[in-house]
Image (cartoon, rainbow, N blue to C red):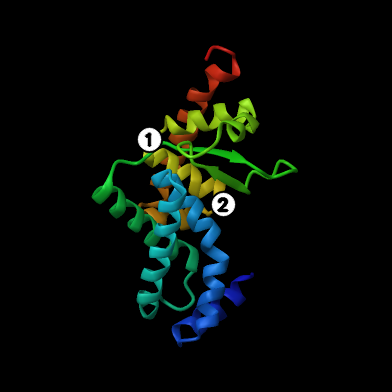
């Protein structure tokens, strides 16, 4: 879906067309669930939070500024829903994830809840993937979320700044430090010391 189509859908949804809103949900549900999972570490909770974010979007559509990109606005609402949930219910959980793309496409990530994955499924994950995600779990929430938004959701710096409500310079700095921290955590695995 291109930007023009997205603008048309948003306009339709703002004017009460349920099919337009449904198309937006279809477009963003998978991405929303992945991002929510990064915060809470549980599939069911992530799905509920993604649905909650869409409910909030639906209620706030009249406040959405025409012509603005939808993704940063949506992901900011999702992030706020996740943070509210974590503050009310529990601390953020640890999570395991693995890549399922066949041609090395790292944008298609399927999340596996470490608390519900079977031993057979766990054995299927490559050792490298397990080590990578174990390293990701060692990052702070700020570092983990900025890596997820940039590298998994492929958001531009300006969009990330809008989602996180921080200046672009802070996005660049935080992303730099997050990558560096991830590299430092991964290095022992790469050198066989871990």
User: For the image shown, how many numbered marks are present on the structure?
Assistant: 2
Q: Secondary structure at mark 1?
A: loop
Q: Nearer the viewer, mark 1 or mark 2?
A: 1
Earlier-in-chain disc, 1 versus 2: 1
Q: Going by the picture, which residue comes out furthest to the left?
A: 88
Q: Which x, y percent locates residue 193?
A: 54, 12
Q: Secondary structure at mark 2?
A: loop
Report x, y in % for residue 110: 58, 46
**Tag 1 near tag 2, CB within 8 Å:** no
In this picture, is 173 found above or below 46?
above
Out of 171 and 64, give the one closest to the viewer: 64
Tell me which residue sits at (53%, 24%) in the image. 186
Horizontal side, residue 104 vs residue 186: left or right: right
Whole-percent x and y of residue 37?
Answer: 45, 48
Q: Which residue is mark 2?
A: 154
Between marks 1 and 2, how big is the CA–CA gap? 20 Å
Disc assigned to residue 27: none
Quick one: quadrant of the N terminus? bottom right
Q: Which mark is residue 140?
A: 1
| Res. 162 visible in picture | no
Closer to the camera in the image, 154 or 91: 91
Q: Nearer the viewer, residue 88 or 114?
A: 114
What residue is shown at x 50% (from left), y 82% (from top)?
18
Question: Residue 122 sits in which quadrant?
Answer: top right
């Amino acid at each position: 879906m291109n930007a023009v189509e997205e603008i048309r859908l948003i306009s339709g949804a703002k004017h009460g067309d349920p099919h337009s809103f449904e198309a937006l949900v279809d477009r963003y549900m998978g991405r929303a669930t992945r991002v929510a999972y990064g915060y809470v570490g549980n599939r069911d909770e992530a799905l509920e939070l993604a649905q909650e974010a869409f409910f909030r979007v639906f209620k706030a559509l009249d406040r959405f500024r025409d012509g603005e990109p939808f993704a940063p606005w949506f992901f900011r609402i999702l992030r706020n829903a996740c943070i509210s949930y974590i503050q009310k219910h529990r601390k953020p959980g640890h999570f395991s994830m693995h890549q399922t793309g066949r041609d090395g496409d790292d944008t298609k990530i399927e999340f596996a809840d470490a608390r519900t994955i079977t031993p057979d499924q766990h054995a299927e994950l490559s050792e490298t993937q397990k080590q990578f995600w174990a390293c990701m779990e060692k990052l702070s929430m700020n570092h983990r979320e900025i890596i997820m938004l940039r590298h998994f959701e492929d958001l531009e710096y300006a969009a990330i700044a809008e989602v996180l409500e921080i200046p672009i310079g802070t996005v660049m700095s935080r992303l730099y430090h997050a990558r560096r921290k991830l590299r430092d955590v991964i290095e022992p695995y790469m050198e066989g010391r871990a």
